[in-house]
Image (cartoon, helix red, strand yellow):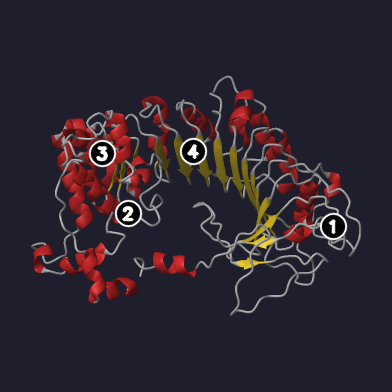
Amino acid sequence: MKFLRRLKNGDEAQIYEYHAPTAFAPRNRSGRDCTSRLPLKVLTEILSNICPHASDDNYLSLEDSMRDGGCMLCDMRHLSQCALVSRRFLVATQTILYHNVRIDPVHYCEREVDLAAKRKRKSFFERNGEPVDAPKQRVEQFSRTVRDNQSLAIQVEFLKMPYMTRETCIAAMARTVSVLPNLKYVDLPDGIYSDDRSCVTLKQELEARCADLRKMKYLRGAERSFALLSQSRPWQNLEILELSRLEIDPNTLVSVLASFPALHELRLEELPMIDDTIFRRNNSTSLFPPIATFSLQSTPGLTAGGFEAYLSRPEVREGLTDLTILNTGVIPSELHRILATAPYLRNLRINRTIHRVLTPSTIPPLASRSLQRFQFEIESPSASPVDLQPPSESYYEYLASSILAGNFPSLASLYALSTSLPSLLLPPPAAPFANPKSPSSALRQPLMLYTKSIPEHDWYLTVISPPTATNRRGSATATRPISFYNGSTQLGPQWGDKARDSVIVGNGFGGFLAVPNEDGPRPSSSSGHKHKHSWSKSKSSAGWMG
């Protein structure tokens, strides 16, 4: 907050003073409204650029769906001011504002400095002497608005609010969702997922009034309500379901999952009673539904044999695109069986701690023509002897040989807990002044290789480019791809990390260029793009975080 305090005390703070704008309609010299001939759909699309977050149709919480470099509250305020232009603008802005409703706690801009100072005044305190809870007031105001205006209530599809607000405003949330029949996603308190008594009314309102809900979660303690889903069938359009630490048998799990015809994303975590029987064909029970995005964590009862039985069904084999298996019964030496039966798999992540060295000659190599993103996290026990090679390195040698054999033509991103994998994928340097030969066609596109030694470290990015033939003498760069470490590439929210900044450029004879002077200019990559410093971005983004 040092940057914001400086703005508050200095002359620059004056530029952030708020002045209510005068409502006017865009007119030309003849005095006619230039937007009157625009269709309402086009006008709505234009105004939606003022408030970008209102067009987000994701099922992420308020904390996970924040936009970098913008202030959601200011965007909503600017869009609401457009409603003063005309009746057509009012209709268009209401369509945008009440589609995805966000109750943000603070302004993510310099305006928060002035507002924080005003909240210290006595007029902003409640009768009991406590400061006014602004998000709570916004929830209550929104609740009154949608309860009094049904035409606005039917437009609300997404409702997001901070964690503390949804934990303390359970009664207000129950009154609000009871009048939102088209609600698809809402940030809910944790107690509703475990059948807490304080959330009984809210959950009943969701089941009775919000039939179009698309995402739900069940945690330990909600076994009874989960088992009743196959009979009540409250949400037939449910798309995403998360189950964690539930004590349920395989038959109950399959019967409930089969009652959701639109389900395409499933996450199972720490289900001790679940095993391969959920994938078997049984005439007395329902079949396990086809899932496009399947995530399994801490489920030792599920093995590669069970996945083979599951993928033997054509509708499952053609629909599975994303698979995550973390600490399950699937061992890395059997991963080739899953890849062979999943021809449309695009994203795969596996994490497993192993104790034995792999013998690649005894198993077929890994191969997938469709895989684009592969996270291969094989760890060795921390108590391994220091002077011996960890058993996990044999699995990375097995992976490298499979890639160099050309078995992954579509692979674009690879994540591994091994710092030796880049050297395994880079061919040895050729002798100086040797005639280059035609390169191998193992890599058909640049491979983004993320590596680190332990999970707590940062990801290192190495871009491995496919070799190309050249007739230049005295250079070996044609047969040895150049390695880059680029910090400008950010990982997705599911990784929660960033790659480090550095550059490694080959000198053409098997070595690397010397590190330049700190005072001199930084080198550019072989493609001509200069690597920018990331300190300025970090400094600006840390201003509101303190």
* Residue designated by label 2: 163
Residue at image position (54%, 28%) is 289
Please indicate whether residue 54 sits to the left or right of residue 535 in the image. Answer: left
- Mark 4 touches mark 1? (CB < 8 Å): no
Q: Earlier in the sequence, mark 3 or mark 4?
A: 3
Q: CA distance from mark 4 to mark 1?
A: 66 Å
> The residue tagged with tag 4: helix, strand or loop?
loop
> The residue tagged with tag 3: helix, strand or loop?
loop
* Residue designated by label 4: 248
Residue at image position (80%, 48%) is 404
Residue at image position (75%, 46%) is 443
Q: Identify the mark at residue 472; answer none if there is no mark.
A: 1
Amino acid type, residue under disc 3 in the picture: Tyr
> The residue tagged with tag 1: helix, strand or loop?
loop
Q: Is residue 125 visible?
A: no
- x and y percentages locating residue 89 in the rendered image: 21, 36
Q: Residues within 10 Å of mark 3 (few under 14, many from 20)?
A: many
In the picture shown, does residue 370 fall above or below 400? above
Q: CA distance from mark 2 to mark 3?
A: 21 Å
In the picture shown, does residue 5 fall above or below 361? below
Please indicate whether residue 191 sits to the left or right of residue 448 in the image. Answer: left
* Residue designated by label 3: 98
Amino acid type, residue under disc 4 in the picture: Ile
Residue at image position (60%, 79%) is 518
Q: CA distance from mark 1 to mark 3?
A: 63 Å
- Mark 4 touches mark 2? (CB < 8 Å): no
Q: CA distance from mark 3 to mark 4?
A: 39 Å
- Mark 2 touches mark 3? (CB < 8 Å): no
Between circles 4 and 2, the one closer to the viewer is 2
Between circles 2 and 1, the one closer to the viewer is 1
